[in-house]
Image (spheres, rainbow, N blue to C red):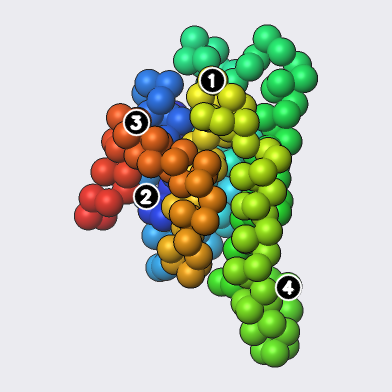
């Protein structure tokens, strides 16, 4: 059985959804980020970076969302959540997830964790002001060039859809309107109908 370390409303939701999709046996363990649990020695032993998600497997602990999504798709091939028999298509899926991780998520983090990149308050405020434009530009690229439809890679649902859903559901809190992007808005609504998504959201919304 896997041990899955997560925090509600974080990027760990993508892995949470995929665990539900594949039907893997796992224990969900909530990490209190607001209380600093991620900086305690017990959690740092799992992830020295002090972040969620973390997934303890019989082989060891894995971190970072793109790696976890690829691992689960490969470990549970019967779920068909990645094009494992097509090296080029799988690389494109990895490229999409890497873009979400390295560009879209980081652009958002500049609004909430600017102190990672600067100590000057004016610089931090400048980063915050840039977030809506940077996110809009990123999602415009996804809408127009990277999203095949009806799912990220076309007809087949993959782990990339879970990851995209997580970032798009943050739009309201970032002061953006997802309806500006019709394809992604419809994708978000379709994701909410999936039982695995509903189960993950219900667990994360439950009292600690």
- From the image, tell me which residue sits under label 4: 117
Residue beneath disc 3: 194
Foreground residue, 118 or 54?
A: 118
Q: Earlier in the sequence, mark 1 or mark 2?
A: 2
Q: Is residue 36 visible?
A: no
Q: How far from the left and from the top, in percent, is residue 175? A: 48, 69
2 vs 4, front mark: 4
CA–CA distance in space, label 4 to label 3: 37 Å
Q: Residue 157: x percent and y percent?
A: 51, 24
Gap between marks 4 and 1, in whole Å?
Answer: 38 Å
Quadrant placement of the C terminus: bottom left
Q: Quadrant of the N terminus?
A: top left
Closer to the observer: label 3 or label 2?
Answer: 3
Horizontal side of residue 151 vs 110, given as left or right: left
Tag in front: 4 or 1: 1
Mark drawn on residue 75: none
For the residue carrying disc 3, how many other residues have a C-alpha within 10 Å: few (<14), some (14-19), or many (20+)?
few
Which circle's residue, 2 or 4, is located before the other in the chain? Answer: 2
| Residue beneath disc 1 | 156
User: Which residue is depicted at the point 52% across and 29% down?
Assistant: 150
Q: Quadrant of residue 147?
A: top right
Asked where in the image residue 24 lies, by quadrant, the reply is top left
Q: Secondary structure at mark 2?
A: strand
Task: Classify mark 1: helix, strand or loop.
Answer: loop
Residue 23 appears in view: yes
Mark 1 → mark 2, Cα distance in angstroms? 31 Å
Where does label 2 land, which residue?
A: 30
Q: Does 139 appear above or below 58? A: below
Q: Which of the marked residues, 1 or 3, is nearer the chain's N terminus?
A: 1
Taking the view exactly as shown, the residue that stands out farthest to the left is 207
Q: Position of residue 3 (x, y in %)?
A: 43, 35
């Amino acid at each position: 059985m896997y041990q899955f370390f997560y925090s509600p409303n974080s990027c760990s939701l993508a892995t949470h959804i995929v665990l539900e999709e594949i039907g893997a046996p796992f224990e969900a363990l909530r990490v209190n980020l607001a209380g600093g649990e991620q900086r305690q020695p017990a959690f740092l032993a799992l992830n020295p970076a002090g972040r969620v998600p973390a997934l303890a497997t019989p082989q060891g602990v894995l971190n970072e969302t793109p790696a976890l999504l690829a691992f689960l798709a490969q470990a549970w091939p019967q779920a068909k959540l990645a094009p494992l028999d097509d090296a080029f298509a799988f690389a494109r899926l990895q490229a999409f997830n890497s873009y979400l991780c390295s560009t879209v998520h980081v652009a958002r983090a500049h609004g909430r964790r600017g102190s990672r990149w600067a100590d000057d308050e004016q610089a931090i405020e400048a980063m915050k002001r840039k977030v809506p434009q940077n996110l809009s530009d990123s999602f415009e690229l996804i809408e127009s060039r990277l999203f095949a439809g009806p799912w990220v890679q076309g007809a087949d649902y993959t782990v990339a859809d879970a990851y995209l859903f997580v970032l798009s559901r943050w739009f309201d809190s970032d002061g953006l309107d997802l309806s500006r992007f019709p394809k992604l808005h419809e994708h978000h609504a379709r994701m909410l109908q999936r039982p695995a998504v509903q189960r993950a959201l219900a667990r994360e919304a439950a009292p600690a």
